[in-house]
Amino acid sequence: MRFCKGLYLSPSIRNKQQKIKWKLRTGRPQPAIYVVALAKNTDLLEIYHSGMLKQTYYKKKENMPYIVGLASGYGQAVSLVTQILEDVFQTTGGYDVKRFFLK
């Protein structure tokens, strides 16, 4: 699993970042955690439930998502996506999210 260095976090999980990342890497269940990742296609971002990442498809290196945010609950994940897009627009003047995170 790949995480960006400036990982976006919802306010309710800021102090639990390392534990959540460890649980994601080891496949431990986290029913309330959602992951925001760069999209593999032409979309900007994707939201995954943490349980989806336990599938064998995501364990292959070429299919691993590049995680840019972690949220507690789907509503907070949507808010996180909004925050990320606002930051990208303010920094770059556009919505090239992949270039913003992979620079």
Image (cartoon, rainbow, N blue to C red):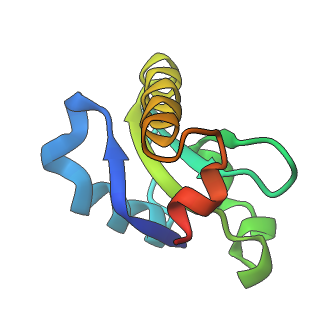
Residue 35: % across, % down:
52, 45
Quadrant placement of the N terminus: bottom right
Q: Quadrant of residue 70?
A: top left
Placement of 59 over or under 70, stated as above or below? below
Position of residue 41 in the picture relative to residue 86 (left or right): right
Residue 76 appearing in the image: yes
Residue 83: % across, % down:
42, 29
Query: In the displayed image of the protein, which residue is found farthest to the left?
Result: 15
Q: Residue at x 44, y 59 (%)?
A: 28
Residue 51: % across, % down:
60, 47
Query: In the displayed image of the protein, which residue is found farthest to the top?
Result: 75
Position of residue 47 in the picture relative to residue 7 (left or right): right
Residue 64: % across, % down:
68, 70
Placement of 35 over or under 7, stated as above or below? above
Q: Nearer the viewer, residue 65 or 55?
A: 65
Position of residue 47 in the picture relative to residue 92 (left or right): right
Q: Residue at x 52, y 72 (%)?
A: 103
Placement of 52 over or under 65, stated as above or below? above
